[in-house]
Amino acid sequence: MKKWLGILIMITAIVFMLSNLSSNNGNANELVEQIIPKEPSFEYGILTDSFSVTKGVVKNGQTLGEILYANHIGHPEIHEIVKKSKEIFDVRRVNAGKSYMVMCSKDSIGKAQIFIYEENAISYVVFDLRDGIDVYKGKKEVVVKLKTAASTINSSLWLTMEDKNLSPRLTHELSTIYAWTIDFFKIQKGDAFKVYYEDRYINEEYIGIGRILASEFIHKGQKFYSFYYKENTTYGEYYDDKGKTLRKAFLMAPVDYKRISSRFSRKRKHPVTGRWKGHFGTDYAAERGTPIWSTANGTVVSASYTKNNGNYVKIRHNGTYTTQYLHMSKIKPGIRKGASVKQGDVIGYVGSTGLATGPHVCYRFWKNGKQVDPFKESLPPGDPIKKENYEDFMMVKDSLFNILMAKK
Ligand SMILES: [Zn+2]
């Protein structure tokens, strides 16, 4: 019985489909007689209908002149174009692999009327040759779509992004946002993230991620948040859930000191050896036994003793900055190579071990492997949200937070 019922349903369906098909045909015939106005087509804001349009990619070693010459622009005119465009775009910067478009006249000559060079996915240069030479820059309309993504990290952050089909730029952006709070070399299995960010499109074509608006990063069971907020009209910054900026500066000093006994200098007479030598640190005089703090989050790269340094600790903060603390009376137990420390953690105690005249901390600061004076470095400021913006920030933060929490 069931079998017959099935066949019956099938036949009915076929009959219905056929009858539909024929009525569609009837409609189509009627439509042919109507005149459908053609939509005008624009590219780079220029009506292209009246031109014959060629698109291409700049070949290795190809110059703007060669492309124009191939499109019937003579050498004197090319020379003029190069000269006139100098202020807006240096034509020597035309690079292989970049896209261009030539709009030529539809007559028998097909001379180039407008030439467009794409500097990148968004910006382009227009050489309008129709009435003299007009060169200007334009930007394509970028459509931003907001997206959320979330994942637990099983191996590396990179592989997780790849598995989830997410842009590797997200890893880069996140590691920048959290540069002062999370050591991305220490990301481990079980860490997790949620991120709310912009995906950018031009003419429905994906061109890459834009800004990260909010994120939650769980590292070693601890939650780190970032919320993008603009305190002024020019630029925004990332703040945590309490309104503290994520661009953490170093502490001004590694110790509650009495005085700075010696500053960083390229040349000074050493108080012990009497020899002239650079002093690549800042000396903070303090009572013996005073706690010494790590000036920023980081990982201990050495906690040891040498004849000159005495007991010392060296901490790597990120790919750029490393600090070192010398002449400790004692290194704090537990502070050893590989230990992670937070800004303000006690790492040792003031003393005068090694080459030192009295109890002090010699604080050394490396930037990209070079010793520098931290007081002369433009270190990122650590200002929190301004009082007058706090309420507004909290509102923005709450809505971003809800979006993150809704993502499973
Ligand atoms: Zn010193």
Image (tube, grey):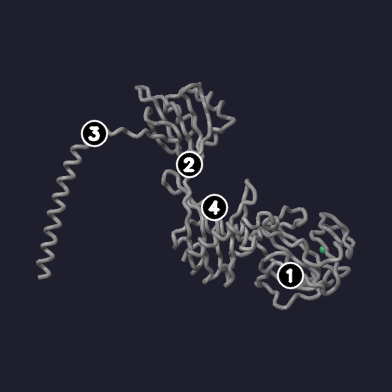
Q: Which amino acid, by three-letter code, is at mark 2?
A: Glu
Disc 3 or 4, which lies upstream in sequence?
3
SS for dot 4: strand
Disc 1 or 3, which lies upstream in sequence?
3
Residue drawn at 81 percent across, 70 percent down: 327
Q: Which amino acid, by three-letter code, is at mark 3?
A: Gln
Q: List the residue tagged with mark 2.
A: 141
Q: Nearer the viewer, residue 340 or 45?
A: 45
Whether residue 210 can be seen here: yes
Query: In the visual, does 199 lie left or right of 306?
Result: left
Disc 4 or 1, which lies upstream in sequence?
4
Q: Which amino acid, by three-letter code, is at mark 4?
A: Arg
Q: Nearer the viewer, residue 28 or 382?
A: 28
Q: Which circle, 1 or 3, is nearer the viewer?
A: 3
Q: Which circle, 4 or 1, is nearer the viewer?
A: 4
Q: Residues within 10 Å of mark 4 (few under 14, many from 20)?
A: some
Disc 2 or 4, which lies upstream in sequence?
2
Whether residue 175 can be seen here: no
SS for dot 3: loop
Q: List the residue tagged with mark 1.
A: 313
Query: In the visual, does 11 lie left or right of 123?
Result: left
Residue drawn at 83 percent across, 64 percent down: 284
Disc 3 or 2, which lies upstream in sequence?
3
Q: Which circle, 1 or 2, is nearer the viewer?
A: 2
**Structural distance between the alpha carbons of marks 4 and 1:** 37 Å
**Structural distance between the alpha carbons of marks 2 and 4:** 16 Å
Tags 2 and 4 touching, CB below 8 Å: no
Quarter location, residue 374: bottom right
Q: List the residue tagged with mark 4.
A: 211
SS for dot 1: strand
**Structural distance between the alpha carbons of marks 3 and 2:** 34 Å
